[in-house]
Image (cartoon, rainbow, N blue to C red):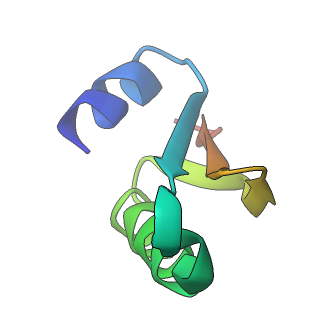
Amino acid sequence: LKNAHKFIADGNRVKVSVRFRGREMAHTEIGKALLDQFAEQSAEVATLDKGAKLEGRMMSIFLSPKTGK
């Protein structure tokens, strides 16, 4: 979270990913909740660019810096 805030402060977009292994694929809702929590904690400095999307075994979100600073 701290490193993501540093990248966003520099004006960069951040991709946050969760990899599911083995039986974890049966519980992707836990990974979605984790990514949503991450986006919520970053709401002060970033906006959610793309929501959680499952691509194979990876679920990821994109955060972009807030405009108007």
Q: In which quarter of the image is the N terminus?
A: top left
**49 relative position to 40: left or right:** right
Residue closest to the eye, 14 or 10: 14
Tell me residue 32's x, y (percent): 56, 75
Which residue is nearer to you in this view: 45 or 1? 1
| Pick the front one: 50 or 52 | 52
Vertical placement of residue 12 versus 13, above or below: above
Give coordinates of residue 29: x percent, y percent. Answer: 57, 85
Q: Which residue lies furthest to the front in this view?
A: 22
Give left or right: position of 7 versus 16.
left
Residue 17's place in the image compared with 27, above or below, is: above
Seen at 77% across and 60% down, the residue is 53
Give the residue displayed 39% in from the left and 58% down from the top: 44
Q: What is the tally of numbered marks visible in this picture? A: 0
Relative to 31, does residue 15 appear above or below in the rendering? above
Q: Where is residue 4 in the image (x, y as percent from the top left)?
A: 35, 33
The x and y percentages for residue 62 are: 66, 43
State the residue at coordinates (42%, 47%): 45
Q: Which residue occupies 74% across, 63% down?
A: 51
